[in-house]
């Protein structure tokens, strides 16, 4: 075992507790990465059948885009609670031919009838999530199929219809109910079983969720996917199917919403400039606003740059103190400034400006947690209000690389688990509009993430691609889990880039999550052993069950390896 392997194994909990004398290495189970297969092309996704769908495309000569898009479609079938064609997403794509990084924003939009006060009750107070999520009000116009069409037209190598084949097969022939899917049905039976179709598909006649191992068939979705495969994206956004979607939202038994066929027909995915910055010798690129992912992940890293995290290592509480402090500063800025840049002024360049971030970093005291953390004033910032938003964890991230050197990093979501609960054509419709601020303003100042017609709600999704000093893409990673996504991606990046762990091991590292003045540490993880040390630094760490699910791929000298979160059902499939 190499010294590096020993460090990783110790901290990941493969050995005895890091605070005790390590067991002799012969007694340790082999570290996971020593057996990690190396591929020339691969997919990492949150469900093995979805990873296989992507791999099928690679085997057929498809690009990383073909693989990622087929994975997105397959997830609609096998992980219906988290993402799919009823939602939206963000794609980062490294195109080897041009050597350029592209990003597509397929985030959902608010309909024309939406207003900044739509989530306020008659007494002026905001609706709770429980009130706002179920039914029509929370549904945004889905963006994934337009994103798919845009990405396929530019980066696809296989015919459009080919990308639908695995998802159609899984929907028509059925797939095995997984334990995780079962648990999500059991945890939220009302949301999952809101429609007769969903009840019949996922529940027994006595209303109990179908059991792990049972075959789930979705012929309605199979038929709809066949139609999309044959007729193209307009079959989703125009005509009878768009009208069916709109009717579902407008006639929802709960919270009906005045979405129109015009709202659906006018939906557009958007090319956006990636948000890139340097971290030590690497260039780290993420998604621009309306995602808060790109700027916040970069800020966390950049503020950490002056510390020697490599020397400190993952077993040092000081490392985690520094990471927590950097997160607190970056999340404070995110709360203050992020929204849809097509509607509000977002100081994107200022938020990742190295001089600004070195000033923010100076606020980190290695000896002591700051008593209070506030948003800074990045260059270009206007007056804004801080409005806390809530997110219910769900989502799916997948990464793919092909033999030609293209790399995809795609995070897709229907927002909360089971989205709005509404279904049409065999898939769930998102509840993305509850990612908006429910309050239009605070202290008389407009919230950057207030609802406006046609606007995209702020997101935490953080698909990321990292380049080495020679400009080669070496890592594509992202996560699910609401606002913890940013913290998961930042931690995994520190794991790979500073602690030289393989991507799977970096994902498996325990999670710290410090979005403000509280610090959550992953319950049952090795971080709990550091509670006293973190408390001595002035934190009040609370052990919490965090919604963690990350997926990534990493280029090594011999080829690509993949990592899927051991807390999830995720898998890597490659050639
Ligand atoms: N809707 C969230 C976002 O776009 C993600 C939801 C989740 O992962 O839980 O940021």
Image (spheres, rainbow, N blue to C red):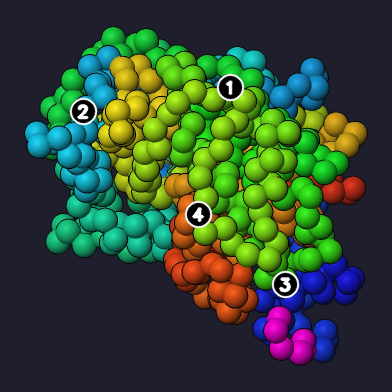
104 and 66: which is toward the camera? 104
Left or right side of 15 for 368:
left
Mark 1 / mark 3, whichever is N-terminal:
3
Place of residue 554 in the rendered image (x, y in percent of width and height, measured from the top left)? 76, 47
Locate residue 307: give its quadrant: bottom right
Task: Note whether residue 170 is visible.
Answer: no
Answer yes or no: do the residues labelled 3 and 2 have beta carbons within 8 Å?
no
Mark 4 / mark 1, whichever is N-terminal:
4
Q: Which residue is mark 2?
A: 118
Left or right side of 370 for 155:
right
Answer yes or no: do the residues labelled 4 and 3 have beta carbons within 8 Å?
no
- Report the magenta residues as a range: 18-23
Rendered residue at 84%/34% (across/down): 472
Q: Which residue is mark 1?
A: 380
Q: Which residue is mark 4?
A: 372
Q: CA distance from mark 4 to mark 1?
A: 24 Å
Place of residue 184 in the rendered image (x, y in percent of width and height, measured from the top left)? 34, 57
Q: CA distance from mark 4 to mark 3?
A: 26 Å
Closer to viewer: mark 1 or mark 3: 1
Q: Does the closest atom of ligand 1 sit within 8 Å of the Cβ of label 3?
A: no
* Residue 274 lies in the magenta-colored region: no
Place of residue 463 in the rendered image (x, y in percent of width and height, measured from the top left)? 60, 38
94 and 526: which is toward the camera? 526
Mark 2 / mark 1, whichever is N-terminal:
2
Mark 4 / mark 3, whichever is N-terminal:
3
Q: Which residue is mark 3?
A: 315
Answer yes or no: do the residues labelled 2 and 1 have beta carbons within 8 Å?
no
Closer to viewer: mark 4 or mark 2: 4
């Amino acid at each position: 075992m190499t010294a590096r392997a020993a460090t990783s194994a110790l901290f990941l909990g493969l050995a005895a507790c890091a605070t005790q004398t390590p067991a002799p290495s012969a007694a340790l189970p082999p570290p996971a990465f020593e057996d990690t297969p190396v591929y020339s092309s691969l997919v990492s996704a949150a469900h093995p059948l979805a990873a296989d769908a992507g791999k099928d495309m690679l085997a057929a000569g498809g690009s990383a885009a073909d693989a990622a898009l087929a994975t997105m479609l397959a997830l609609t079938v096998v992980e219906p609670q988290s993402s799919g064609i009823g939602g939206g997403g963000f794609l980062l794509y490294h195109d080897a031919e041009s050597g350029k990084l592209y990003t597509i924003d397929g985030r959902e939009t608010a309909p024309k009838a939406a207003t900044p006060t739509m989530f306020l009750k008659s007494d002026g107070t905001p609706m709770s999530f429980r009130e706002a999520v179920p039914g029509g009000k929370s549904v945004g116009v889905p963006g994934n199929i337009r994103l798919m069409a845009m990405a396929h037209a530019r980066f696809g190598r296989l015919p459009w219809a080919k990308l639908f084949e695995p998802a159609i097969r899984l929907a028509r022939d059925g797939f095995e109910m997984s334990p995780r899917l079962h648990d999500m049905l059991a945890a939220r039976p009302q949301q999952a079983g809101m429609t007769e179709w969903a009840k019949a598909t996922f529940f027994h006649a006595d209303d109990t969720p179908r059991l792990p191992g049972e075959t789930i068939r979705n012929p309605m979705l199979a038929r709809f996917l066949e139609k999309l495969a044959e007729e193209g994206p307009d079959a989703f956004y125009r005509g009878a199917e768009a009208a069916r979607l709109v009717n579902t939202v407008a006639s929802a038994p709960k919270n009906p919403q005045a979405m129109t066929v015009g709202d659906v027909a006018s939906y557009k995915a958007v090319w956006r400039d990636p948000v890139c910055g340097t971290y030590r010798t690497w260039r780290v690129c993420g998604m621009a606003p309306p995602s808060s992912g790109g700027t916040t992940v970069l800020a966390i890293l950049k503020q950490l740059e002056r510390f020697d995290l490599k020397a400190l290592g993952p077993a040092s509480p000081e490392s985690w103190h520094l990471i927590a402090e950097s997160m607190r500063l970056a999340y404070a800025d995110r709360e203050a400034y992020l929204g849809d840049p097509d509607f509000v002024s977002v100081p994107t360049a200022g938020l990742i400006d190295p001089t600004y971030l070195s000033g923010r970093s100076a606020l980190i005291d290695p000896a002591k947690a700051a008593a209070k953390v506030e948003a800074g004033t990045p260059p270009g910032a206007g007056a804004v209000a801080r409005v806390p938003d809530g997110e219910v964890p769900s989502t799916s991230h997948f990464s793919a690389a092909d033999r030609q050197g293209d790399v995809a990093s795609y995070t897709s979501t229907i927002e909360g688990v089971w989205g709005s609960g509404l279904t049409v054509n065999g898939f769930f419709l998102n509840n993305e509009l509850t990612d908006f601020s429910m309050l239009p303003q605070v202290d008389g100042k407009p919230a950057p993430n207030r609802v406006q017609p046609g606007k995209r709600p702020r997101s935490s999704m953080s698909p990321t691609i990292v380049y080495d000093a020679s400009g080669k893409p070496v890592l594509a990673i992202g996560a699910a889990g609401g606002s913890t996504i940013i913290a998961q991606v930042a931690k995994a990046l520190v794991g790979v880039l500073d602690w030289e762990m393989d991507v799977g091991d970096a994902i498996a590292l325990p999670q710290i999550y410090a979005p403000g003045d509280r610090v959550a540490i992953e319950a049952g993880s090795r971080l709990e052993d550091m509670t006293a040390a973190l408390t001595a630094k002035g934190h009040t760490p609370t052990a919490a069950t965090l919604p963690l699910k990350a997926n990534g791929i990493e280029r090594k000298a011999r080829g690509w390896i993949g990592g899927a979160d051991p807390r999830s059902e995720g898998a890597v499939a490659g050639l």
